[in-house]
Amino acid sequence: MASSKCILPFVFVLFFPFVIYSQETLETDSLYLPSADSIRTPALISDTTIGDGDFDSFEAPVLAIDTTKKINYWRITRPIGEIVPACPDTFLTDYFNRTNAEGQSVFAAYLGNLGLPMESRVFFERADRSQFMFNDPFYAYIKSPETFNFINTKVPHSNVAYQRAGSRIVMEERFQALLTTNFGRKLNVGVDMDYLYARGYYQSQSAKHLEWVFFGNYLSDRHRVHLFINPGNRTNAENGGIVNPSDITHPIGMGANFTTRDIQTRLGFGGRNSVWNRIQGNQVYLNYRYNLGFERKTGFTDEEGDTIKQFIPVSSIIYTFDYRDNEKKFYTTDSTSVAKYYADNFAKLPSHIKDYFNDVRGVRDSTSWRSMSHTFALSMREGFSKWVKFDLTAFLTYDIRSFAMMTTNDAMMQDTTRHAMYIGGELAKRTGKFFRYHAQGSVGLLGENLGDLNLSGTIETRIPFLGDIASIQANVCFKNLTPTWYEKHYRSRYFWWDKEFDKVKKLHIGGTIDIPHTQTRLNVGVENVSNYIYFNKDGEPDQETDNIQVIAVRLDQNFKWKALHWDNQIVYQKSSKPNIIPLPDLAAYSSLYIQFLWGAMTMQLGVNCHYWTKYYAPTYEPATQQFKLQDMQKTENYSPVEVGNYPLMSAFVNCHLKQTRFFIQYYNMGAMFISPPNYFSLPYYPVNPTIIKLGLSVDFIN
């Protein structure tokens, strides 16, 4: 009976607007924001087309910037630094949601507080495990060259954004600032700062992030340079989840002054923020491209009557330097509670390791890594002749990695260095109105990743449909990858492993249909994985030798009737082995609101809802910061926990006035009338209770 009560509000939001649906063409200045493709699309295809657009017509090369625009935004791809046009986050729709942890990844499973580790509930949104796996749970907050917007602007441009929620003791705050300007037409420099401090509504749950990005680019006919420098620091307290979920679902007899801070947690309770994880790191990325080509007369003249010439790039010489380092520390001032929490893990360690750690006061686990890679590439450019309708690039990458881990000798840290060399290529047609494609592949030649294979390809066709252009895209990806160093080796006080794993093989086939006229985007994908590596119930990596199939269908569908809007994102997915890859069968996000003008201000008033069906979600391991399987063995004092079938609803007022966006959100309002209020994102990790959140973003364009 409780289950049906939980789902009713979501069903109402999801299906009511069908009776008033009316298809309308998107306005040019529409606030509709297409979501990221959840089905793995290994290629990026530019939306920039130069020329008249006919299939057989001559098309000039894709330009880096559109000189008619006041501000241009783009991203670059690894490893060769191709430019992909991008849009800044200036959309009003869903602005309030994108400031929440749930909005960082629409179907995110996280630890209940902004800035804490998270993992997508959608399998195809999960990236391959990185070389420094401790960064992976912070994928929504980490800055990287391929996800950062580079800028070229005719006027100084800056943006300031601030959000907050809660009282002083539990306050959540985030301050973001961007400042960039051009020095002449070709050179742009800027700085981006992101400071997050969320104290948390439960004991020992705080998160503190400070990320800087110093960036710049130089674009001329012959030279193209991108520079990205990113020092970062992320610290978060660990509480291991709450002890009794009934303190959330059935808070009976707790007393009038009872608050969420009084709920007992497995770690850090009573010793405020006494168990910590801290990751520090730096990244320096430099991409340089030298273009070889010729000048061609355009048929236009300047003010003095001279013929204007256009530079046509024929080929490019490319160099990319990529340096990264990180250090992770797990430490505590409350050794007693941590030792109790990890008593079983400690008992499994060999005696000589236990003897060593028994002589060490407290917990001071640490590990670090460094990576330096160099990529050299040669490229033939698309469009320098009417017969050349594709880019062709060959590249060579050399990567040297160093890992430092704890040992039982006086040195404390032991360095291990690994080398890897890859050779690869890329074939792409990025212009053309009706047909585009992109294929990329690399092979491990030497070192740690010898024999690795990474192949991907995308084909896209565009067809006229209902007065607009619809897109149909097919993609395929095959990978044969060596397990990462930390998957095979790790040293710490409570976890110590050396594993021998086979290469992981993945084959993904998918497709996308995008119809802008009806605001419809449909993704379908299927993936077969063999030798899949996961973290088992004991918190250690393990490998499943059998094949695992995952299939997913995602529908993004927006509706509009006069002032009424209804935006939806729905994913259905199935895993052939839910005991290894547990997934909710259905995950959905829906937002129902009215949009109108009040004077010069655009306003959106409505309610949104995150929902997923019940499943045995992975739980979280504080010492390694990885998501692991639950122990499915029931005992007298323990039983596995399902999460889901609870609509996480919020009411909002979202506004836009000139260059300013601001919102007021009543977060998790369903907790007031849904019984039981089972608002757990992960087993033993509830989200914040009902609170009011505020946010403001201002663009300054002088």
Image (cartoon, rainbow, N blue to C red):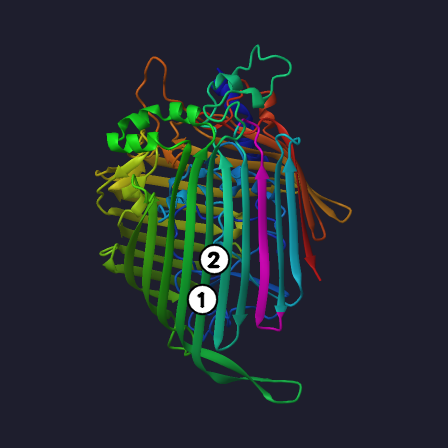
Q: Amino acid at mark 1?
A: Asn
Q: What is the x, y in percent for residue 150?
A: 54, 61
Image location of residue 151, percent across then percent down: 57, 62
Q: CA distance from mark 2 to mark 1?
A: 10 Å
The answer to whether 468 is drawn above or below residue 137 in the figure is below
The local secondary structure at tag 1 comes to strand
Q: Position of residue 478 (x, y in %)?
A: 28, 52
Q: Are marks 2 and 1 in contact (CB under 8 Å)?
A: yes
Q: Is residue 383 visible?
A: yes
Q: Earlier in the sequence, mark 2 or mark 1?
A: 2
Residue 322's label in the rendered image is none
Q: State the extent of the magenta-drawn residues as a range.
A: 183-203
* Residue farthest toward the top in the current orientation of the protein: 253
Q: Which of the 4 image quadrants contains residue 348?
A: top left
Q: Which residue is mark 2?
A: 145
Q: Residues within 10 Å of mark 2 (few under 14, many from 20)?
A: many
Query: How many residues crowd mark 1 within 10 Å: few (<14), some (14–19), many (20+)?
Result: many
Q: Amino acid at mark 2?
A: Pro
Residue at 48% in and 75% down: 223
Out of 424 and 525, give the one closest to the viewer: 424
Question: Where residue 645 sits: x, y (%)?
Answer: 47, 25
- What residue is drawn where x is 63% and y is 47%? 92
Question: Which element type, helix, strand or loop, lies under badge 2?
Answer: helix
The residue under label 1 is 287
The image quadrant of residue 455 is bottom left
**Is 59 situated left or right of 393 in this image?**
right
**Of all residues shown, which one is farthest toward the bottom?**
305
* Residue 185 part of the magenta segment: yes
Q: Is 27 covered by the magenta stretch?
A: no
